[in-house]
Amino acid sequence: MQLNHVHLKSKNPDKLCEFYKKYFNLSILAKNDIEIYIGTHKGSWLTIAQSSKEDLPLPPWFHFGFCLSSKEEVTNLFEKMKHDSLKFPRELTAFGEEALTYYVLDPDGNIIEVSWIKDHQG
């Protein structure tokens, strides 16, 4: 079994889409009047839709993550995001030689965990 998508609501779907394209190399898979589907062509994607007043807020602990292939990739992306003045609920943190992770906010305030985990294919 594999998780195939996460559905996000956005005040500005096009701006959010550009964020994920820039930092996570995602591509637009499909777009219609209601939603943008952005992903990697490997079976996983984000669905981004326009938010509305009826939307319920996400709980403060909600986040999703991207697991990268190396510590260097995590560090390089962190430095790029830091240079671009993004906000970090948790700065770059090492867990011994087993993991490296940080949390960053996307333009809508969603929390994204970026990590490398030893012996895990990112």
Image (cartoon, rainbow, N blue to C red):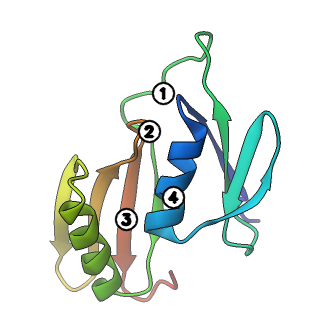
Disc nearest the viewer among 1 and 4: 4
In terms of depth relative to the viewer, which is nearer, 93 or 105?
105
Marking on residue 114: 3
The amino acid at mark 3 is Val
Judged from the image, the secondary structure of the residue bearing numbered disc 1 is: loop
Query: x%, y% of residue 92?
Result: 18, 66
Q: Quadrant of residue 54?
A: top right
Q: Earlier in the sequence, mark 3 or mark 1?
A: 1
The amino acid at mark 1 is Leu
Q: CA distance from mark 1 to mark 2?
A: 6 Å
Q: CA distance from mark 2 to mark 3?
A: 14 Å
Q: Quadrant of residue 50?
A: top right
Which residue is drawn at the image coordinates 21% and 86% (left, top)? Answer: 97
The amino acid at mark 4 is Tyr
Is residue 112 placed above or below 108 in the rendered structure? below
Q: CA distance from mark 3 to mark 1?
A: 19 Å
Judged from the image, the secondary structure of the residue bearing numbered disc 4 is: helix
Q: Earlier in the sequence, mark 1 or mark 4?
A: 4
Which residue is drawn at the image coordinates 60% and 24% (left, top)? Answer: 51
Q: Which residue is mark 2?
A: 62
Is label 2 in contact with label 4 (beta carbons under 8 Å)?
Answer: no
Please rate how many residues cluster around mark 4, counting C-alpha atoms within 10 Å: few if below 14, some from 14 to 19, many from 20. some
In terms of depth relative to the viewer, which is nearer, 15 or 110?
15
- Left or right: residue 60 versus residue 47 is left
Q: Which residue is mark 4?
A: 20
Which residue is drawn at the image coordinates 31% and 52% (left, top)? Answer: 104
Q: Earlier in the sequence, mark 2 or mark 4?
A: 4
Disc nearest the viewer among 3 and 4: 4
Q: CA distance from mark 2 to mark 4?
A: 18 Å
Q: CA distance from mark 1 to mark 4?
A: 19 Å
